[in-house]
């Protein structure tokens, strides 16, 4: 789908100024495309639809029609830009009602609303509009879902499953040890380079959301697993052709993807007899929960996780509080 120049400008802002991930920018683009289609249906015309599929009538009197087609696209882009900038609060509310009729979940609706908030804040900042139509719109209240985490014995079963005698098994062992030892995101894991591992200080240099750098302490067990993996990797006869920067590479020597990490985890979960709905992010949840259960400070865990807001980290206190209440109920004679 060809994008409107205003939306292109916004997506470039997300990519190059806010440093959003390609996946997040893609989701924002899809949400805005859906909103444009809704506006088109509201108007009773097909401007956004025609614009979206790139179709345009051609003036065959002008040679091959290329000039006329280009002119039509410009008109369509101008119309859609004007339509987006004229949106008012009532249209936003009708869009939310439309999503509700389509049975979108509250979390999905909240994400689409966040996209529109970000887009119109951008437009206001660039002085394309005089007021933000989202300012009085409230985000739908969502059900609180506690993060899933693994118990310590389950973590041990998982981490002991890969065969460390093979290069791929040693790599997988090192990956999961690092995820649990540091609590970093899987996207941060696959972005790690060899130079990001500092064995002297026992830390990793991590590039988080928005390209923000932070230092993550890593335990000796995880560092030992990295060493074993790198030893096998360096002795592999194909190692000269491997990615020279990436810490974790696939069997072809290329940097691993987040999807590959998920597939590997699924395999070891099945082998260990654990819940296969567990994701790499569950190891991050497990890290945070176990840290807090063992007395870590909430602010410290916030920094380790790379959370911008303490409220994001506070969700884990519900897990630890529930565990404390359970222990109280079991142990106190008058509970």
Image: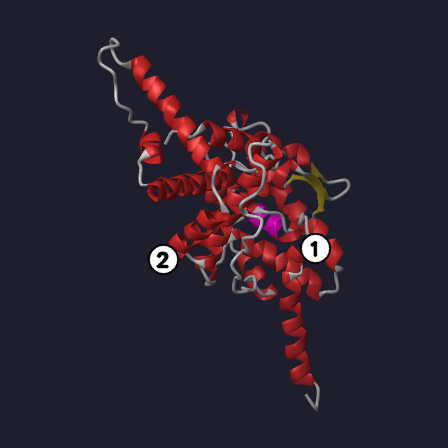
Q: Mark 2 vs mark 1: give the one in front.
A: 2
Closer to the N terminus: mark 2 or mark 1? 2
Q: Quadrant of residue 330?
A: bottom right
Image coords of residue 279 (percent x, y)? 50, 54
Dominant SS type (magenta) = helix
Q: Which mark is residue 310?
A: 1
Q: Which residue is under mark 2?
A: 101
30 shown above or below 100: above
Span colored in magenta: 173-179
Image coords of residue 210 (percent x, y)? 62, 38
Q: Quadrant of residue 332?
A: bottom right
Screen quadrant of the N terminus: top left
SS of the residue under disc 2: helix
Screen quadrant of the C terminus: bottom right
SS of the residue under disc 1: helix
Q: Which mark is residue 39?
A: none
Furthest-left residue in this view: 60
| Structural distance between the alpha carbons of marks 2 and 1 | 35 Å
Q: Nearer the viewer, residue 300 or 123?
A: 123
Q: Is residue 244 magenta?
A: no
Which residue corresponds to the image point at 35% horizontal and 18% vertical from the top-left? 70
Q: Nearer the viewer, residue 83 or 314?
A: 83
Q: Is residue 177 magenta?
A: yes
The answer to whether residue 219 shows anywhere in this view is: no
Say whether marks 2 and 1 touch (CB < 8 Å).
no
Crowd tier of the residue under label 2, counting other residues whose Cα lies within 10 Å: few below 14, some 14–19, many 20 or above: few
Which residue corresponds to the image point at 54% horizontal and 55% vertical from the top-left? 139
The answer to whether residue 150 shows anywhere in this view is: yes
Which residue corresponds to the image point at 70% horizontal and 53% vertical from the top-left? 302
Q: Quadrant of residue 200?
A: top right
């Amino acid at each position: 789908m060809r994008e409107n120049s205003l939306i292109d400008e916004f997506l470039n802002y997300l990519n190059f100024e806010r440093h959003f991930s390609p996946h997040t920018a893609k989701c924002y683009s899809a949400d805005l495309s859906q909103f444009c289609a809704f506006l088109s249906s509201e108007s009773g015309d097909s401007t956004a639809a025609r614009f979206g599929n790139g179709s345009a009538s051609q003036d065959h009197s002008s040679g091959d029609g290329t000039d006329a087609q280009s002119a039509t696209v410009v008109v369509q882009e101008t119309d859609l830009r004007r339509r987006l900038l004229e949106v008012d609060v009532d249209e936003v509310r009708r869009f939310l009602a439309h999503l509700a009729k389509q049975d979108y979940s509250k979390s999905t609706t909240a994400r689409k609303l966040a996209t529109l908030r970000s887009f119109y804040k951008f437009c206001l900042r660039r002085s394309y509009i005089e007021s933000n139509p989202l300012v009085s719109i409230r985000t739908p209240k969502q059900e609180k879902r506690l993060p899933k985490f693994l118990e310590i014995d389950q973590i041990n079963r998982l981490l002991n499953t890969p065969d460390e005698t093979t290069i791929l098994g040693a790599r997988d062992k090192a990956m999961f040890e690092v995820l649990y030892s540091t609590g970093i995101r899987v996207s941060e894991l696959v972005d790690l380079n060899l130079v990001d591992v500092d064995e002297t200080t026992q830390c990793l240099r991590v590039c988080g959301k928005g390209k923000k750098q932070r230092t993550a302490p890593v335990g000796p067990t995880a560092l030992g697993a990295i060493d074993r993996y790198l030893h096998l990797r360096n002795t592999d006869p194909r190692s000269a052709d491997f990615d020279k920067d990436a810490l974790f590479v696939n069997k072809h020597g290329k940097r691993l993807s987040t999807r590959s990490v998920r597939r590997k985890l699924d395999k070891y979960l099945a082998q260990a007899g654990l819940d296969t709905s567990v994701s790499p992010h569950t190891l991050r949840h497990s890290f945070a929960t176990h840290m807090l259960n063992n007395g870590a400070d909430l602010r410290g865990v916030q920094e380790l996780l790379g959370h911008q807001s303490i409220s994001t980290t506070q969700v884990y206190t519900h897990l630890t509080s529930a565990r404390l209440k359970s222990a109280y109920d079991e142990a106190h004679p008058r509970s």
